[in-house]
Amino acid sequence: MRQESLSRIRIFSFLIIGFALILAGRLYFVQIVSGEEFLGKADRQYVQSSYDYYNRGSIFFETKDGDIVPAATLKNGFIIAVNPTLVGDKDLLYEKLNAITPIDKDEYLKRVGKVTDPYEEIARRVSSEAATKVEALGDEAVTVYKERWRFYPGNSMASHVLGFVGYNDDDFGGRYGLERYYEDTLGRNNDSVFVNFFAEIFSNIQDGISTVESLEGDLVTSIEPSVQAFLEQEVRKVEENWSSDFTGGIIMDPSTGAIYAMALTPSFDPNNLTDESDASIFSNKFVESVFEMGSIIKPLTMAAGIDAGAVTAATTYYDAGTVTLNNKTFSNFDGRARGIVNMQEVLNQSLNTGVAFVVGQMGKGSFAKYMLDFGIGEETGVDLPNETHGLVENLKSPRDIEFATASFGQGIAMTPIETIRALATLGNGGKLVNPHVVKKINYKIGGFKNVTPGLDKQVLKPETSEEITRMLVNVVDVALLGGEAKIPNYSVAAKTGTAQISKGGGGGYYDDRYLHSFFGYFPAYDPDFIVFLFSYDPKGVKYASETLTTPFMDITKFLINYYEIPPDR
């Protein structure tokens, strides 16, 4: 009997302890995890029942020192509303309100004229100070409500990366950029109803810890705000100097794929969008558009030839200035023959005939395989929406001419993000990395997740990476602006690209319109950064060396100083 009583006491004790743990858990969720949500619900007691107190996760940049900086957050303010059925002297009320906060009079009169409507908003996003003054008027026809909205502290900074929130028909959520890609993480369930707290305790525990809510959180990106600001400054200069249709740049860690900056101009301010905004400006051309990149592809061709054992830096060929294949003729950029030259000079002088020779030495099939292994023609998986892939049908052609032109970046098209990913293999030991913007998710329920973009793919031998790097350093030291671009005590590997812009529809190429591109990485033999720049149809200038060399070198010097990178030679 005594033993039975002890058993009952133990069971009862376990039940009490279990209940206490459940209660503590629920209190944790209410006070800590969902504290902000319940605070919003409390605020909603002072607003009309139909008003949705907006909530959404935040996006942060991260400085080089590990500090996080808000990039997309929430801002608090107030709505001023009137009850037209209670308004007495409309003009007098307007004068009182307008003296506190600017109100459009025509719109005000239109709204207060709706005498059968008990609720009309006449001002939004009003400051706390102004709201207090409005409440102090004590007019029964006027009510002040709290509101929240999405706010981007940097205005247009990294707008193509961040995107914005807005309506798509009746659906309100992330549009473009990270806002759209991570909608499941950033979005919040704002439709939950008030329930009795103790009823919640005894409700289905699984319902109380929903798998959807567990995905909710904030994003910490690899975007470094000072680096982003500097890159944006440089691409704007190119735009202003050469009146390009658009100009962009990416700065990335070639060993991890972490993107430090991504800038495109023209840009937009997500805080000031209107119904008249041109939707085409929201498109992120780094992931959504493809281009024939021109001569910056030559180092990939050369690296493939070296890796396959078909050529070395010292291999020579006879440059006649032009080559005819399948009844089609192409030439060097200047049409000039140079006689016997080696592979180093092919890169230094950017010879189309030279990289076509490399393809001939290694074979079309081998060349095509290397190009596809560089990720050309496939999506990179970068965490930005609407990514497309390059166009590589010419690499399946039976004709020699298609492979020859592909060797110098014509006839195949790539997204800029594909391009920088492929070029990073030249300096990082031959690995195809996975570009990404978000590095960590801080979950609403607590804890965090480091974003791991996947395993790298080895596409070049490490010794090939070292050799092509040495050749590209020679390009900067000797050939780029006649060696004047060289930075003392620092090794920089780089190459320019100038590609004719296609007319589309198989109509050939424009004679006076070009895509300029430039890439480089440094310190060359163990790079911290790879930089890619491009400018579409700059006016009054032909070669990328004229438009993009100075911006690239200014960016390089900024990064060296900002990150205090020690000299490597």
Image: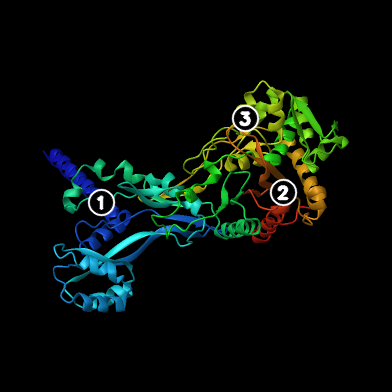
From the top left corner, tell me how far across and down residue 371 is, in percent. Answer: 65, 31
Amino acid at dot 2: Lys
Residue type at numbered disc 1: Arg
State the residue lying farthest toward the top: 398
Q: How far apart are marks 3 and 2 (CA)?
A: 30 Å
Give the residue drawn at x 42%, y 49%.
179
Residue nearest the viewer, comparing 304 with 467: 304
Q: Is residue 280 left or right of residue 469?
A: left
x and y, in percent, of residue 480 in the image: 78, 50
User: In this figure, which residue is indicated by the disc labeled 1?
Assistant: 26
Of helix, strand and loop, which one carries label 2?
Answer: loop
**Residue 477 appears left or right of 265:** right
- Local packing at callout 3 (Cα closer than 10 Å; few below 14, some 14-19, many 20+) is some
Observer-side mark, 3 or 2, equals 2
User: In the picture, which quadrant includes the N terminus?
Assistant: top left
Q: Residues within 10 Å of mark 1 (few under 14, many from 20)?
A: many
User: Callout 2 environment at 10 Å: few (<14), some (14 to 19), or many (20+)?
Assistant: some
The numbered disc on residue 542 is: 2
Q: Which residue is drawn at 57% across and 57% down?
A: 228
Amino acid type, label 3? Leu
Q: Quadrant of residue 237?
A: bottom right
Q: Residue at x 77, y 27 (%)?
A: 324
Coordinates of residue 302 in the picture (x, y in percent): 74, 34
Q: Residue 372 carries which label?
A: 3
Task: Out of 177 and 326, give the one closest to the viewer.
Answer: 326
Percent x, y of residue 465: 72, 38
Give how far apart the Cα atoms at labels 1 and 2 are: 67 Å
Q: Which of 424 and 371 is in front in this view?
A: 371
